[in-house]
Image: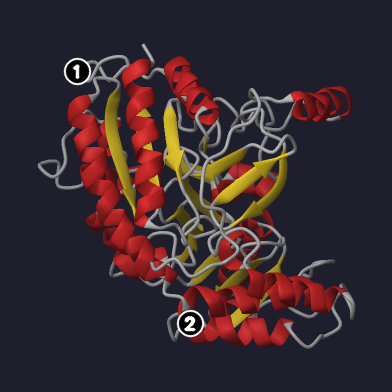
Amino acid sequence: MPRRFAWRRPLIKLVTDIPGPKAREYLELSRRYEPRSMSEQPPVVWATAEGVWVTDVDGNVFLDFSSGVLVANAGHSHPKIVREIQEQAGRVINCYDFVNEYRPLLAKKLVEITPPNLDRAFILTTGSEATEAAMKMARKYTGRKEIIAFQGAFHGRTYGAMSAGGKRSGSGTRGFGPFVPQVYLAPYAFCYRCVFDKTYPECDIWCFDYLDWFVETETEADIAAVITELYQGGAGSIIPPPEWMEKLDRWCRERDVVLVIDEVQASFGRTGKLFGFEHYKVTPNLLCLGKGISSTLPVAAVVGEARIMDSLGPGSMSSTHGGNPLGARAALKNIEVIIEEKMPENAARLGAYLARRFAELERKHERLGDSRGMGLVWGLEIVKTKAGKEPDAEAAARIVMEACRRGLLMIAPIGLYGNVLRIAPPLVITEQELAQGVDILDDVLSRVG
């Protein structure tokens, strides 16, 4: 992508230790007044962010490989989106369920850019709200109660979303039960750590064939929906083989089960296509969106089939801030910007670059056991030895912190064992900037013992 943004800062610039003196003041306030439930991220206190560059309260400038956890697809503070927000903030911000100028326009746009079977869009605020809404819709429409989800999944932090989330360990959902009943967790296709000790592709996707036995033995066969992420983000950027996704699509259609695809993390260009399911021969009945839908404000949506959505009567589902004119207008402009500036194409091109670079790093570094991803979302699995595949969460945490001290900003390690580095820069990043970040990672991997 050509460098044409005057709003982008050009260089990493570290002027204090990390954290600096001002950052330490804010971090102390956080420790004193905020709960410990939030993720423990590198000690960077954000002040401003532009494009792919983040400046902290002490003036340190970092190259951002987090996108604010996959939100800032169009880059931080994209001037076109900022102007829309500034103008709308002086007019009207929220009006509950009253129709405003921008909510129906956003719904129309989402219907236009998704497959023809998706002809309704329900605008909400968070990914958790979207996944819960989709599960409610499926139950109401089918009259059935059971939901199939997958081990390792992350669909949000509210109770219905947590119930469909299979990531119990670490910062997952362990200790919050009992969960919403009649939600069942089946094995996911995690080829690097196959729970059935098989090897892809010789396995012929045996984990999927297990699904029929699972349903027969673990459920009442009263299945309303299957919900799955396009790739499992929180579990460590786990990407199933394409055959797995396509088998799941056929399985749902043969049984008249609603297929819910959660693309809160994967949509709006992140994987190298506007929507991640476009990589496969798959069409959801309900599509959950969020994060990159606005690149800024809290906006989410369920885009789905009218036959499903219209089974809910007036007043049965709404959202206080859902579809507010400020967020809806920002999302409309964001979608326009992502498409016009060809950000999915940039993500696809740079994804191929990352595939080459990370393959080189795998060969070079004993601690890098696996690299997996598409477009501009990747997971690097840190292990003690390649042969043993023992997860090394401690080393992963040191790598993130050491990278931060060199001006590369990543979130805390993710994954089932807390040992996976998440690589997810804004989609406006250039190859030169991306190479700078990978070079830092290369050097840090060489130095962290």
The residue at 68%/33% (across/down) is 178
Counting from the top left corner in percent of width and height, residue 136 is at: 65, 62
User: What residue is disc 2 on?
Assistant: 113
Q: In the depicted view, which residue is nearer to us: 388 or 371?
A: 371
Viewed as shown, does residue 14 lie left or right of 432? right
Does residue 194 show up?
Answer: no
Counting from the top left corner in percent of width and height, residue 297 is at: 71, 62
Q: Are marks 1 and 2 in contact (CB under 8 Å)?
A: no
Task: Tell me which colouring the rendered structure shows.
Answer: secondary structure
The residue at 49%/27% (across/down) is 400
The residue at 71%/78% (across/down) is 329
Disc 2 element: helix
Viewed as shown, does residue 1 lie left or right of 223? left
- Measure how far apart labels 1 and 2 are at the Cα level: 45 Å
How many callouts does the rendering have?
A: 2
Q: Is residue 376 above or below residue 289?
A: above
Instruction: For the N terminus, give its image quadrant.
Output: bottom left
Instruction: For the C terminus, give its image quadrant.
Output: top left
Label 2 crowd bin: few (<14), some (14–19), many (20+), radius 10 Å: few
Q: Earlier in the sequence, mark 1 or mark 2?
A: 2
Counting from the top left corner in percent of width and height, residue 331 is at: 65, 73
Q: Using the rendered view, name the quadrant where residue 277 is placed.
A: bottom left
User: What residue is disc 1 on?
Assistant: 387
Q: In the depicted view, which residue is nearer to us: 298 or 128?
A: 298
Counting from the top left corner in percent of width and height, residue 93 is at: 87, 73
Q: Amino acid at mark 2?
A: Ile
Q: Amino acid at mark 1?
A: Ala
Disc 1 element: loop
Viewed as shown, does residue 99 lie left or right of 329? right
The residue at 62%/42% (across/down) is 162
Q: Is residue 162 above or below residue 128?
A: above
Q: In the depicted view, which residue is nearer to us: 169 or 347?
A: 347
